[in-house]
Amino acid sequence: MTPLAVIPSPTQGVWELGPFPIRAYALCIIAGIVLACWITERRWVARGGRPGEVLDIAVWAVPFGILGGRLYHVVTTPQPYFGEGGDPLRAFAIWEGGLGIWGAIALGAVGAWIACRRRGIPLPAFGDALAPGLLVAQAVGRLGNWFNNELYGGPTDLPWALRVHEWDGREAVLGADGQPVVLGTFHPTFLYELLWCLAAAAVVVWADRRFRLSHGRAFALCVALYCAGRFWIELLRTDPANTFFGIRLNVFTAVLVGLLAVASLVWQRGRPREVLDRTGGGDDGDTPTVAGEGPDEAPTGTDAGPSDRSRDRSHDTPGTP
């Protein structure tokens, strides 16, 4: 049955600018990183951090994250690179797509830790500032999968079905009539994840303002929400993947990482929010002053004293994600 309405897919994912290929996937990844840095900068400054520190940390975290994302993809999907007929050199072709968020977060955190340590910044506090921006970056990055006609689920005739073309890595394959070959209409799992990430980012921002999350709890909530969505979305996907007991490997990863995130939320419950004093100095190695503000579950209200209200101004700045 042909659906009455479908979501179209691009028929081209690479454009040539002279001798240089411009890849939609790479542009989406870059756009996501830029948005994440912008959101994190606003949140970090509102929490007492210095302007520009987010970019300094990103210089370390982003390359580590890209390397980690690629390593996770290659290790968990080795067949195209080391299997029969595979090309090991393609493991370095990041621009073709294939970045695993689990590896990106793991090694990206290592890069962020190195940068934070050099500047005397507590990593959990920075992670809390980063949390919603990370989800937005993942959402934007999923648009790259749309351009590549990949990451879709099973066949469907729902009104939001995704039309998918036969793909050769750069563009849709053309049939004898010169038109792109259509494989069919499928669940747009990339879109499900995109929308889930945006909704999760909004929840993190709300919870952070309402409960004054601290000591990595906003980041843990971000990870827990992402894992919950990735769990059911992964079960819908039909693209080739390694399995364990017939279940996609990423399903197990989502469950394990999600449980660890929930455990972190519970473990850090009730700890006071850090107060960052980053006003003095500017050299690497400066140690910020960190103090408590009271239980992070207590929302700011009219009963707050003058000192509490003065500290809350930066956190409650209108328009800050």
Image (spheres, helix red, strand yellow):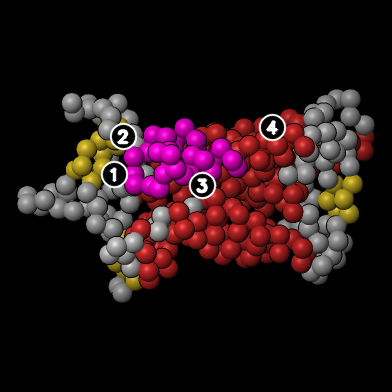
Provide residue 283's location: percent of width, then percent of height: 81, 70
Give the magenta part as a residue range: 230-257
Spatial distance from mark 1 to mark 2, Cα to Cα? Answer: 16 Å
- Would you name the residue on which mark 4 appears? 207
Residue 9's label in the rendered image is: 1
Decide: few, some or many residues near mark 3? Use Cα within 10 Å; few <14, some 14-19, many ≥20.
Answer: many
Provide residue 285's location: percent of width, then percent of height: 82, 67
- Would you name the residue on which mark 2 appears? 154
The answer to whether the residues at label 2 and label 3 have Cβ atoms under 8 Å apart is no
Spatial distance from mark 4 to mark 2, Cα to Cα? Answer: 34 Å
Q: Is residue 154 in sight in this rendering?
A: yes
Q: Is residue 195 in sight in this rendering?
A: no
Mark 1 residue type: Ser
The answer to whether the residues at label 4 and label 2 have Cβ atoms under 8 Å apart is no
Query: Where, by quadrant of the figure, is residue 256 drawn?
Result: top right
Q: Earlier in the sequence, mark 4 or mark 2?
A: 2
Spatial distance from mark 1 to mark 3, Cα to Cα? Answer: 19 Å
Q: Is residue 283 above or below residue 39?
A: below
Q: Is residue 123 above or below residue 20?
A: above
Spatial distance from mark 4 to mark 3, Cα to Cα? Answer: 20 Å
